[in-house]
Image (cartoon, helix red, strand yellow):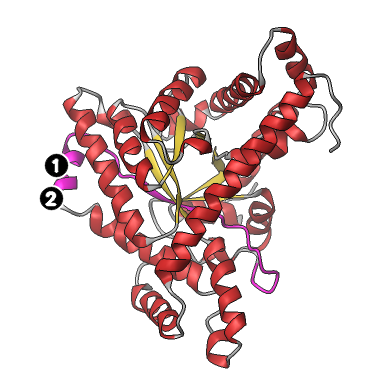
Amino acid sequence: MTNTSPTAELSAAGVSIWLDDLSRQRLTSGSLQQLIDTKNVVGVTTNPSIFQAAISAGDTYAGTISELAAAGDNAESAVFKITTSDVADACDLFAPVAKASKGIDGRVSIEVDPRKAWDTEGTIAEAKRLYAAVGKDNVHIKIPATKEGLSAITATLAEGISVNVTLIFSLERYREVINAFQTGIEAAKENGHDLSTIHSVASFFVSRVDTEIDKRLDALGTDEAKALKGKAGVANAQLAYQVFQEQFSTERWDTLAAAGALVQRPLWASTGVKDPAYPDTLYVTSLVAENVVNTMPEKTLDATFDHAEVTGDTITGSYDAANAVLNELEGLGISYTEVVAQLETEGLDKFVASWKELLDHVQSALNGEKSEA
């Protein structure tokens, strides 16, 4: 690998590249290590859909499931053991990256059972259980940014557990997430934790915003509407970075930083382009700035490595234009508040459906039934 690859340039510009995928096959085949070595990948994120796809595909997990069946495990305990084992192995793989970056990168995320997204106490208990089961310092526990999740985020951080806050769509909710994070860090300080060991990212979703808003723009069908297609997702994320800059420049934060606290970095999620009419690196090259993470599906990572044009910071200075995009959408009758609320609901519904599908698949396998996949 040369030092001039686009992924190397992206890293040099302050963007940490994390892969949005994990499977036992990736771990055992060496393909994940190869991405670390050749494409500047410094972390991994997972979600219920990723695990559902990994465990349901092929026979990679057949032996493990047979052993768990013999031990009397049900689907829920089997899935818990399989996923935490894969994440622990990935944490070991990324341990050198974590050590070199003092824990900033080399992170592997595992999400709480999505059915608990509206259950604060259930989420807190699940976060602690996952953290204990993985048993690695470089794990991130993913907690959805529902209203009920905000208190769980605070409580988990207060225990000294690193958190990846996921499914953020709105700027208002993002501000609430940052407040929940800072409140959690304040509590961790009171609890005597070393703040320099607590890490967090806030996963702000990008492409799904365009998918929903573009659908509404197409329904309007005017030239003015068509001119706004493919702009909302980037604009929303750029304004999120402005919020990040503002909320981590306050006296409140300065006090925590002086005690060793580290900023909660924005993470761009859902960065695979859904509309083939758009450049396949749109949600990478348009969202470059210091102190951010971009978690990419492999297709987006490959496209970025192959032909992304990285021109430095493409966020700072974009705020007026980004605000104009959202204002123009409102002017056309497209409600930002309505869209982001819908996306949160749909995102959680998708994860719950994937989780249930995964449990059904594993239960069938535990019963000795052949998968139809």
Structural crowding at the residue carrying mark 2, measured as other residues with C-alpha within 10 Å and reported as few (<14), some (14–19) or many (≥20):
few
Between residues 14 and 215, which one lies in front from this camera angle? Answer: 215
Picture coordinates of residue 128 (x, y %)? 41, 23
Q: Which quadrant of the structure image shows residue 65?
A: top right
- Quarter of the image where one finds residue 122: top left
Secondary structure category for the residue under label 1: helix
* Residue 123 x, y percent position in the rendering: 42, 32
Q: What kind of residue is marked 1?
A: Thr
Question: What is the magenta range?
Answer: 252-279
Residue type (three-letter) at the residue carrying disc 2: Glu
Q: Is residue 151 magenta?
A: no
Asked if residue 261 lies left or right of residue 252, the reply is right
Q: Residue at x 26, y 31 (%)?
A: 195
Visible in this render: residue 185? yes
Q: Which residue is mark 2?
A: 251
| Residue 153 rendering spot, x and y as whole percentages | 34, 38
In terms of depth relative to the viewer, which is nearer, 36 or 357?
A: 357
Viewer-closest of 71 and 45: 71
Report x, y in % for residue 58: 82, 32
Image check: 336 left or right of 320?
right
The residue sitting at 45% across, 21% down in the picture is 129
Q: Residues within 10 Å of mark 1 (few under 14, many from 20)?
A: few
Res. 314 in view:
no
Tags 2 and 1 touching, CB below 8 Å: yes
Image point (43%, 24%), residue name: 137
Q: Tell whether 314 sits left or right of 3.
A: left
In the rendered image, the residue lying farthest to the bottom is 223
Give the labeled residue for mark 1: 255
Label 2 and label 1: CA atoms lie apart by 6 Å
